[in-house]
Image (spheres, rainbow, N blue to C red):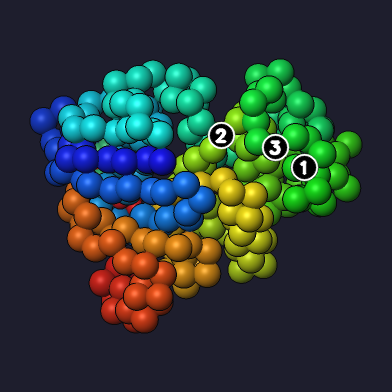
Amino acid sequence: MLEITGLQAFYGEAQALHGVDLRVDEGEVVTLVGRNGAGKTTLLRSIMGLHRDVRGSITLNGAEITTLASHKRARQGLGWVQDDRGIYASLTVEENLTLPTVTHPDSAWSLSEVYEAFPVLADRRRAPGTTLSGGEQQMLAVARVLLTGARLLLMDEPSEGLAPVIVQQIRDILLRVKEQGTTVLLVEQNVKFASTVADRHYVLAEGAVAANLDNSEFTQRQDELLTYLGM
Ligand code: ATP
């Protein structure tokens, strides 16, 4: 589904990615882990087209998207779950989900399927966006992106700074998304959490892929990874 070859990224004179090779197959959940400054966010933003100073190749379903504008990538099925969650505080849950800018006719998800997968959102459909808990907000943010027609979700540390009970809810969200066949690539520093949601993991170090591990190998090497990541 997503294939990246020799990706380099720059901030002016400084180079943040030094030839990243990575692939994500349809239906997989894949994490990016690595120390601070390893280039995880830069990689995710480069895939979405939010960082454009890059060389190398990014293809989505066989089509070259390396130089494509971000909104065109979204039309081709890339969905960015924003860090600030992009929820309109003054609108209700349902209004957030049914804004014309959100709903896409080709989405693999309908509103009723979203409500079926996330019953909490159905229960709270008339509630204003602001009254949702952290986990519910994350659910709404993911649901909105699914309704845009996204087939590959990109997420930057969805569990960061959240209470364990909410991290558990985010795990359930990801597993439900995966069940429906939507592909996910996420930055995740919580190694334990990563091993419960993902099929595969890329370890980034100094702007390049240091390891590509399936989940069983990743889980076996968890202690080593925690030490490496300084946790
Ligand atoms: P973190 O976990 O701290 O977010 P990361 O793995 O996501 O780290 P990036 O944020 O992608 O890493 O940073 C990769 C490199 O690019 C780092 O050396 C960082 O200092 C540099 N960098 C990131 N953003 C900028 C920027 N806006 N301007 C200049 N350099 C940047």
Give the side of residue 53 with respect to residue 141, left or right. Answer: left
Labels 1 and 3 touching (C-beta < 8 A): yes
At which x and y percent is residue 11?
A: 20, 31
14 and 46: which one is in front?
46
* C-alpha gap between disc 2 and disc 1: 15 Å
Amino acid at circle 2? Ala
Amino acid at circle 3? Trp
Give the side of residue 16 with respect to residue 69, left or right. Answer: left
Give the side of residue 55 with respect to residue 71, left or right. Answer: left
149 and 162: which one is in front?
149
Helix, strand or loop under label 1: helix
Q: Quadrant of the C terminus?
A: bottom left
Helix, strand or loop under label 2: loop
Residue drawn at x 24%, y 63% is 211
Labels 2 and 3 touching (C-beta < 8 A): no
Residue drawn at x 20%, y 60% is 210
Quadrant of the rendered image holding ligand 1: top left
- Among the 4 quarters of the image, the one containing residue 66: top left
* C-alpha gap between disc 2 and disc 3: 9 Å
Q: Name which of mark 2 and mark 1 comes first in the sequence.
A: 1
- Residue bearing the label numbered 1: 113
Specify whether residue 16 is in view.
no
- Residue bearing the label numbered 3: 109
Specify whether residue 151 is in view.
yes
Q: Name which of mark 2 and mark 3 comes first in the sequence.
A: 3
* C-alpha gap between disc 1 and disc 3: 6 Å
Helix, strand or loop under label 3: loop
Res. 150 mark: 2
